[in-house]
Each structure stands twice: as C-alpha cells, then as structure tokens.
Image (cartoon, rainbow, N blue to C red):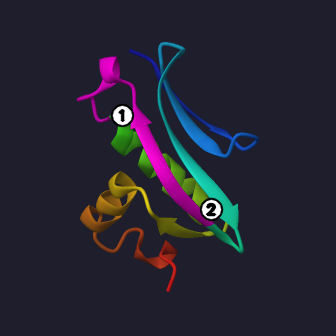
Amino acid sequence: MAVKITHDSADRRFEIHVDSELAGYSEYIESHGARTFHHTVTLPQFRGRGLAAALTEYALDDTSTQGLRVVPTCWFVRDFIAAAGDRYSHLMEP
C-alpha cells in the first residue's frame, strides 16, 4: 500500500492517495494568516487505516512551515490537535 499526501493549493485542500487512488482530503479556507480547516473526509473503503490522522498531521505541519495559524472548525482536526498535547498548540488562533 503506497500512501502519498499532496497539497492542492488551487482547491485549498490536502489530499491523501492510496496506490494513486484518492482516499481522503482535508479542506480549508485561508484568510488573514490562518487556515480554517472545516472539512476532513476519509472515503468509506479506506476508513480504519489511520489515513485521516496522517493527512491531518501533514496538513498541520505544512501550515506551521508556512507560518500560518489554525482555526479547527472540523471536529477531526480539533480532536487531533487536542490529542497531540502541546505539539500544535502554537498554531491555534488566540
């Protein structure tokens, strides 16, 4: 199983592919120095493999590298950040 994560900046989303098939995505809106992650999806046939967590980690790391903050309106992203302890707390909007 080959997993590849990409950033589709034109569509404002991160995508995860398994063996070149789209397995999920995380959509965001970028404004005023922040990315608001509002929707994360793992397609049904790919659920239960930890792909959403891998995708979210990649998206948050990329957001940090870009010097942007995070507004997690998506419940999965919000719960992922909470479970990560202090790893992503510096990205949160005050």
**In magenta stretch: residue 64:** no
Q: Is residue 19 above or below residue 57?
A: above
Q: Is residue 90 above or below residue 20?
A: below
Horizontal arrangement in the rendering, residue 40 relative to residue 27 (left or right): left
Q: Residues within 10 Å of mark 1 (few under 14, many from 20)?
A: many
Residue at the right extreme of this rendering: 10
User: Could you tell me which quadrant the N terminus lies in?
Assistant: top left
Q: Which residues are magenta?
A: 35-50
SS of the residue under disc 1: helix
Alpha carbon separation for disc pair 2 and 1? 21 Å
Under mark 1, the amino acid is Leu
Q: Is residue 20 above or below residue 36?
A: above
Residue at the bottom extreme of this rendering: 94
As rendered, which of 93 and 74 lies closer to the eye?
A: 74
Q: Residues within 10 Å of mark 2 (few under 14, many from 20)?
A: few
Name the residue located 48 percent from the left edge and 13 percent from the top edge: 19
The numbered mark at residue 93 is none
Q: Position of residue 65 (x, y in %)?
A: 62, 62
